[in-house]
Amino acid sequence: MSQQNRVQIKCSDCGKTDTVSFKPTPGKPVYCRDCLSKHRVKRTDSRDRVENRSPVPSVEKQAWSRRQNNWK
C-alpha cells in the first residue's frame, strides 16, 4: 500500500505513533504493530482452548431428526 493511503495513529496501549492502512473508528482502540501482535496472540490463545468450545450436538438433538418422526 502506498504511503499516501496510510493514516497516522497514536497507539491506545503504548502511545507510540504509527501508520495504518484504514481510517480508525472513533471510540475503538487502535494499536501500533507491536501492540497489535500482542493482542492477536492473546485472542488466538483463548480461542484454541478446548474448554471454550461448545459441545457437539448429538444426532437426536438435530432439528432434521426431530422432524423426521413427523413424516411417518
Image: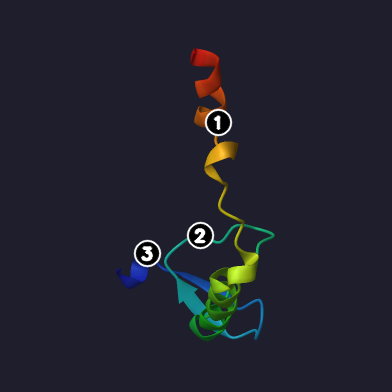
Q: Name the residue under label 1.
A: 63
Q: Name the residue under label 2.
A: 23
Q: Which colour scheme is used?
A: rainbow
| Mark 1 and mark 3: Cα distance apart in space | 49 Å
Indicate whether 2 appears above or below 61. below
Q: Is mark 1 on a helix, strand or loop?
A: helix
Quarter of the figure with residue 61: top right
**Spot occupied by residue 32 in the image (x, y as percentages of width and height):** 53, 80
Q: Is residue 57 left or right of residue 7?
A: right
For marks 1 and 3, give the one nearer the viewer.
1
Which residue is rendered at x = 60% and y = 62% of the image? Answer: 53
Indicate whether 66 appears above or below 1. above
Q: Name the residue under label 3.
A: 5
Quarter of the figure with residue 9: bottom right
Q: In this view, does 6 lie to the left or right of 38?
A: left
Front-most of residues 41 and 67:
67
Which residue is rendered at x = 65% and y = 84% of the image? Answer: 15
Sequence-wise, which precedes: disc 3 or disc 2? 3
Which residue is rendered at x = 54% and y = 72% of the image? Answer: 48
**Spot occupied by residue 68 in the image (x, y as percentages of width and height):** 50, 22
Residue kind at label 2, given as amino acid type: Lys
Sequence-wise, which precedes: disc 1 or disc 3? 3
Q: Residues within 10 Å of mark 2 (few under 14, many from 20)?
A: few
For marks 2 and 1, give the one nearer the viewer.
1
**Spot occupied by residue 12 in the image (x, y as percentages of width and height):** 66, 76
| Mark 3 and mark 2: Cα distance apart in space | 10 Å
